[in-house]
Image (cartoon, grey):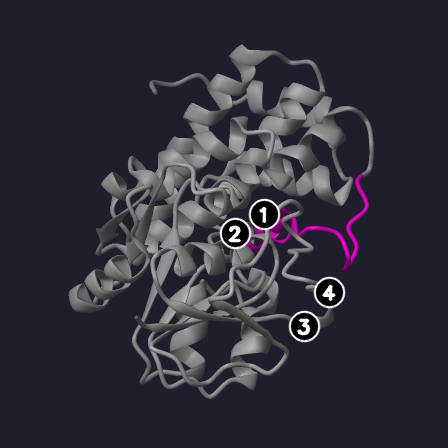
């Protein structure tokens, strides 16, 4: 039995704590407000209960065999600054940092350069992982022994893990898919139909591939779980917060984001991707950023996309 620390008690962090306990480990789950976990209940995952193997704490854990960072991407730097970790990190958040424009592993390397780190990513909804439904994910990192150790730590009969030595491609897949999911939701909410969504997902995959290759990743990573798999789930699954946000925009609503509401990572990621890769052709990201900022309507963004110069695929 290993000691696992999960930092972040949102839906994803709670699901990972349940998965780690299911894999036979003792788990410490860090929450900003540990008092909200009453009688084993899970405030971000109603209907699930924490087993005795999971302890809740409001003190950042610094002693464990592995530390899973499941805080929202825009809070990762602040939380890591408060920590003095002595165990390998598995970064379980997706997106690109606003302002500094860093990926999760880049933030970890900056703040804790001596610490081994990898990322966990792929097509996973928290409530399904919590329920133990069949799923697959990717552990991406350049250290083969660390990948193998993290895979062995969390894998169970219903949670299949694959290794990947292209963390750049895997991280950008996890970031860009949230942006593309907002666009997919907007198309469906606006009544543009399933043909439009299928076209968007396909061209989104091409956009992601251009971005990954330009940033030093591999195009084949985009065809895997951290790219295509995550993109399809987030653009079609009703449990996706990013898809739901886009759906509301397509219906003419203006979703309100608050500290208490679930995080919609694609909102911050869209302008961050454009700022990080200004020379890359990212029309979907550009359109989503305009929708979020209110500088374009859905009809205007769609018209601009369809008016692009005809060319071979």
Location of residue 142 with respect to 126 vertically, above or below:
below
Rendered location of residue 52, percent (x, y): 51, 65
Q: CA distance from mark 4 to mark 1?
A: 32 Å
Q: Which tag, 3 or 1, sits closer to the chain's start? A: 3
**45 sits left or right of 278 in the view:** right
Q: Position of residue 230 (x, y in %)?
A: 42, 38
Q: Which residue is mark 2?
A: 273
Q: Which residue is mark 4?
A: 36
Q: Earlier in the sequence, mark 4 or mark 2?
A: 4
The answer to whether residue 33 is seen in the rendering is no
| SS assignment at label 1 | helix
Task: Find the magenta span and give its range.
Answer: 255-272
Q: Which residue is mark 1?
A: 270
Q: Are marks 3 and 4 in contact (CB under 8 Å)?
A: no
Secondary structure of the residue carrying tag 4 is helix
Q: CA distance from mark 3 to mark 2?
A: 29 Å
Of pointers 3 and 2, the one earlier in the residue sequence:
3
Contact, mark 3 vs mark 2 (Cβ under 8 Å):
no
Instruction: Tell which tag, 4 or 1, sits nearer the viewer.
Output: 4
Dividing the picture into quadrants, the one containing residue 221 is top left
- Above or below residue 288? Residue 100 is below
Q: Are marks 2 and 1 in contact (CB under 8 Å)?
A: yes
């Amino acid at each position: 039995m290993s000691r696992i620390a999960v930092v972040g008690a949102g839906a994803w962090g709670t699901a990972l704590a349940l998965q780690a306990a299911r894999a036979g480990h003792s788990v410490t789950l860090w929450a900003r407000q540990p008092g909200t976990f009453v009688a084993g209940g899970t405030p971000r995952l109603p209907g699930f209960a924490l087993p005795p193997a999971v302890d809740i704490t409001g003190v950042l854990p610094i002693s464990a065999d592995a530390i899973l960072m499941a805080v929202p991407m825009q809070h990762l730097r602040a939380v890591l600054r408060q920590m003095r970790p002595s165990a390998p990190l598995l970064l379980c958040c997706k997106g690109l940092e606003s302002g500094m424009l860093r990926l999760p592993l880049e933030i970890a390397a900056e703040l804790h350069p001596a610490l081994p780190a990898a990322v966990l990513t792929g097509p996973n909804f928290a409530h399904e992982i919590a329920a133990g439904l069949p799923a697959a994910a990717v552990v991406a990192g350049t250290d083969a022994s660390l990948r193998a150790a993290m895979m062995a730590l969390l894998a169970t009969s219903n949670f299949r893990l694959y290794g990947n030595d292209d963390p750049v491609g895997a991280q950008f897949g996890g970031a860009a898919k949230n942006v593309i999911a907002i666009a997919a939701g907007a198309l469906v909410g606006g009544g543009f139909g399933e043909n439009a969504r299928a076209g968007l997902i396909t061209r989104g995959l091409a956009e992601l591939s251009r971005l990954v290759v330009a940033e030093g990743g591999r195009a084949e990573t985009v065809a895997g779980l951290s790219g295509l798999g995550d993109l399809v789930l987030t653009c079609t699954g009703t449990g996706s917060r990013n898809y739901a946000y886009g759906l509301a925009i397509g219906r003419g609503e203006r979703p309100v984001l608050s500290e208490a509401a679930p995080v919609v990572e694609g909102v911050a990621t869209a302008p961050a991707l454009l700022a990080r890769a200004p020379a890359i052709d990212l029309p979907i990201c550009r359109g989503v950023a305009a929708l979020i900022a209110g500088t374009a309507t859905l009809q205007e963004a769609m018209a601009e996309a369809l008016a692009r110069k005809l060319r071979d695929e």
